[in-house]
Amino acid sequence: MRKFLVIAIPILTLILFILIMLSGNHLKKSLVENNNIPDQIQVIEGYINKEEWQEVSKETKKLEEIWQKIVVIVQFSSERNEINAFTINLARLRGAIRAKDKSSALIELNEAYEHWKDLGK
Amino acid sequence: MNEGLVVFVRSIIGFFSLLIFTRIIGKEQISQLTFFDYVLGISIGSIAATLTTDLASRAWPHWVGLLTWAILGYLMELITIRWRYAAKYLEGEPTIVIMNGKIMERALKSLKYRVSDILALLRNQGVFDVREVDFAIIEPNGQISILKKPEYQTVINKDMNIQVPPSGISTELIYDGIIIEENLRQLNKNRTWLMDQLRKQKIGDISEVFLATLNPAGDLYIDKYDDQITKVTDIGDYKGPY
């Protein structure tokens, strides 16, 4: 029993560490029910194309809320640069919405999507 | 993103991964490490440190690096145990630096050792005069092994046919000015006896004593904080900045 524990505890510890380090890519998708980032980005993109800025603003706030929840969980397995880059894209998106600048908004949204894809990969 | 918390979690991952890997790699002590083992240890430690604090990249690639270095270190160890030919290449071999009392300058040069290094290593072995040495060998771990000339070799009791009782191991009675009561009890001694012994050596208080040990033959060794040495011998071999 003692020998088993001596071998099992390190192995289980290493497995736990690996799970923590690799969890980001899965957690970012499945964490928040009905509130995942790619869907939300698509919704916002749709409203931007229709130039319904009121709706864009509302949905962007929702996107930020989802992002805040996801960051808490994926921070242990993701790189800070991707997290920071996504946050910056959101800030720029807010500016583009205020200026009702369709092209800037689409640029930021698409870049944010790329950062989200690379998160935890 | 709470950077402090992330570093905390990563530190736990790095610390325990390192602990587990080093346990697997081997039980060699620092003094037995070859130069490569030493560098290997530094590299693995450095990767673990980056894993902990480099938040710009994920922990995973650093951890894979850590694992790979540890596996390679373990493989090298297996190879050197099972294949002597490889061991000779990977770990090096002993080099004679003093032969028949003569310093082998070429060997020193190839080892990148200075004479002062050899003299320091000899002093570590209790040899303060190079004339006493017949053979000196630098081992792969950088330590020196020496064979003294016959005339300088110590006479041992067996040479003189002297029977001596086993000396045993000394027991600490006072350490850092504090009496170790448990050891006193084990030796069937008490505070009064110890104070009497100290008074015989003109010591009034226990706090003056740094270390006191008693060997099974009943000899007491006492070292005081105040060593009262006025003239310190300088062993520097070259006039440096100080």
Image (cartoon, coloured by chain):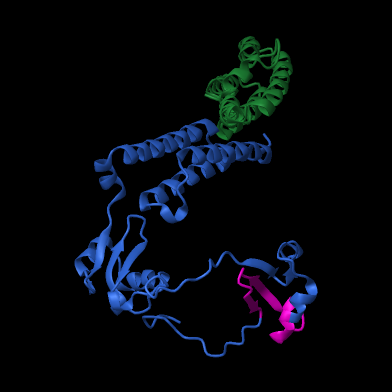
Chain colours: A green, B blue
- The residue at the point 33 percent across, 70 percent down is B118
- The residue at the point 45 percent across, 48 percent down is B28
Q: Is residue B24 magenta?
A: no
- The residue lying furthest to the left in this view is B106
Please state, as top left, top right, bottom left or bottom right, where the N terminus of chain B lies in the image: top right
Q: Tell which of A5 and B15 is nearer to you.
A: A5
Q: Is residue B140 above or below residue B114?
A: above
- The residue lying furthest to the right in this view is B192
Q: Tell which of B192 and A113 is nearer to you.
A: B192
Q: Is residue B201 magenta?
A: yes
- Specify the quadrant of the image occupied by residue B149: bottom left
Q: Position of residue A111 (x, y in %)?
A: 54, 23
Q: Which residues are magenta?
A: B197-225
Please state, as top left, top right, bottom left or bottom right, where the C terminus of chain B lies in the image: bottom left
Q: Tell which of B22 and A1 is nearer to you.
A: A1
Q: In this rendering, does residue B40 appear at all?
A: yes
Q: How many numbered badges does the structure rendering display? A: 0
Q: Tell which of B25 and A118 is nearer to you.
A: B25
Q: Is residue B49 above or below residue B106?
A: above
Q: In this rendering, does residue B130 appear at all?
A: no
Q: Is residue B130 left or right of residue A66?
A: left
Q: Is residue B6 left or right of residue B61?
A: right
Q: Position of residue A35 (x, y in %)?
A: 69, 13
- The residue at the point 72 percent across, 62 percent down is B186
Q: Is residue B198 left or right of residue A42?
A: right
Q: Position of residue B185 (x, y in %)?
A: 75, 63
- Specify the quadrant of the image occupied by residue B11: top right
Q: Position of residue B35 (x, y in %)?
A: 37, 53
